[in-house]
Image (tube, grey):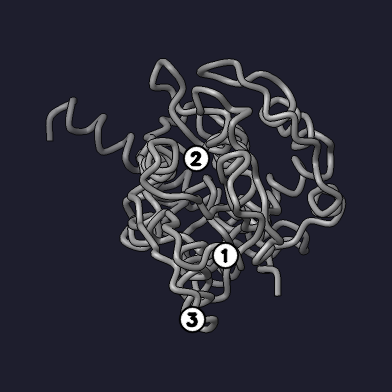
């Protein structure tokens, strides 16, 4: 073996050792030290953390137009409330694995493919605007929750639409693959409301259909509706209305059956929520001018969100 090959083999061995040591450290937190062999045998395998330690790279899933959670700004940089939280979690993973550097590979996801890309290993961690539901929880793991939302409607100011009962016979757009898509279809079938449901690939496409008059309402999470409203040529022309059809929590997604990874992520998020740092991030994105147009959503934190900051948890809302 040449000297170059030998150095390469040594680096790979050191990386693998780093992963093994880091993963053992995770298992030993909060309990008495045990012999190394016994501890190693008791540690649940974490292929995600082991691969991150060996390659020095983490794959982060982000949205392209989920304002103000995860989206492209005017320079095509990924920004937003959820993105800020995810970057801090990535820092925590780097520290946990004692890595000198960590490369962040940003992977765009949509409402339609986000779960699949987490399941198949393309994405290690996705923090965007994904609702934690029992159905999704059978496919992926969710972190400590990071936001609380309600599903409502965005309509033109002065339109004869104030609530879901007013949608009968009208065209309403939803983003395909969202909980709003499922909820509105269930509502339509159970009430016989004859709502004409139009699907869009992403939130940006959905709002364009509304702004261009192709539909009369957009159903989505209220926080996202305020984000879409901020994109409008005349934001004051649009209002958020309707009795919430559901209340949900957002969480970051990971692959199932990787408790060591989830422990690191949850620990980092819990610290951010309870320390007041998450509230500062909230203020930046919901109560200050945001890119790309400097629009201010002017939306104070709800009592439900403040309660989540005080008492973090990872369960979907009933």
Residue at the location (72% across, 56% down)?
A: 29
Residue position marked by numbered label 1 in the rendering: 259
The Cα atoms of the two marked residues, 3 and 1, are separated by 44 Å
Q: Nearer the viewer, residue 246 or 134?
A: 246
Is 95 located above or below residue 206 in the figure?
A: above
| Residue 37 numbered tag | none
State the image coordinates of residue 59 (x, y, percent, origin top left).
39, 42
Label 1 environment density (alpha carbons within 10 Å; few <14, some 14–19, many ≥20): some
Of 185 and 182, nearer the camera is: 185
Using the image, determine if residue 289 lies above or below residue 221.
above
Nearer-N-terminus badge (3/1): 3
At x 52% / y 84%, what residue is drawn? 190
* Residue lying at 66% horizontally and 66% vertically, measured from the top left: 246
Q: Which of the numbered marks, if any, corresponds to residue 192?
A: 3
Q: Earlier in the sequence, mark 1 or mark 2?
A: 2
Q: CA distance from mark 1 to mark 2?
A: 28 Å
- The quadrant in which residue 234 appears is top right
Quadrant occupied by the N terminus: top left
Label 2 belongs to which residue? 66
Residue 206 at x, y percent in the picture: 41, 45
Which of the two discs, 1 and 2, sits closer to the camera? 2
Mark with earlier residue (3, 2) = 2
Q: Could you say whether the residue bearing mark 1 is in a helix, strand or loop?
A: helix
Residue 92 visible in this rendered orientation of the protein: no
Gap in Å between the C-alphas at discs 3 and 2? 31 Å
């Amino acid at each position: 073996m040449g000297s170059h090959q030998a150095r390469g083999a040594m680096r790979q061995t050191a990386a693998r050792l780093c992963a093994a040591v880091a993963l053992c450290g995770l298992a030993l937190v909060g309990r008495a030290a045990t012999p190394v062999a016994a501890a190693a045998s008791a540690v649940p395998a974490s292929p995600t953390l082991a691969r991150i330690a060996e390659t020095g790279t983490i794959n982060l899933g982000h949205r392209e137009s989920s304002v103000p959670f995860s989206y492209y700004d005017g320079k095509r940089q990924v920004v937003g409330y959820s993105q800020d939280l995810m970057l801090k979690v990535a820092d925590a993973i780097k520290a946990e694995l004692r890595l000198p550097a960590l490369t962040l590979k940003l992977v765009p996801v949509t409402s339609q493919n986000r779960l699949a890309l987490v399941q198949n290993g393309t994405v290690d961690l996705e923090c965007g605007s994904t609702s934690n539901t029992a159905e999704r929880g059978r496919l992926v793991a969710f972190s400590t929750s990071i936001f609380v939302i309600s599903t409502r409607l965005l309509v033109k100011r002065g339109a004869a639409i104030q609530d879901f009962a007013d949608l009968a016979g009208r065209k309403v757009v939803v983003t395909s693959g969202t909980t709003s898509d499922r909820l509105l279809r269930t509502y339509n079938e159970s009430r016989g409301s004859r709502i004409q449901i139009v699907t869009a690939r992403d939130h940006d496409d959905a709002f364009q259909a509304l702004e261009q008059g192709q539909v009369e309402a957009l159903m989505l999470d209220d926080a996202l509706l305020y984000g879409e409203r901020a994109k409008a040529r005349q934001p004051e022309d649009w209002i958020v209305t309707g009795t919430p059809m559901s209340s949900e929590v957002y969480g970051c997604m990971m692959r199932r059956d990787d408790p060591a990874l989830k422990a690191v992520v949850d620990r980092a998020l819990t610290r951010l929520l309870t320390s007041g740092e998450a509230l500062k991030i909230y203020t930046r994105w919901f109560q200050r001018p945001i890119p790309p147009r400097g629009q201010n959503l002017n939306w104070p934190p709800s009592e439900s969100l403040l309660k989540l900051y005080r008492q973090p948890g990872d369960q979907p809302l009933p």
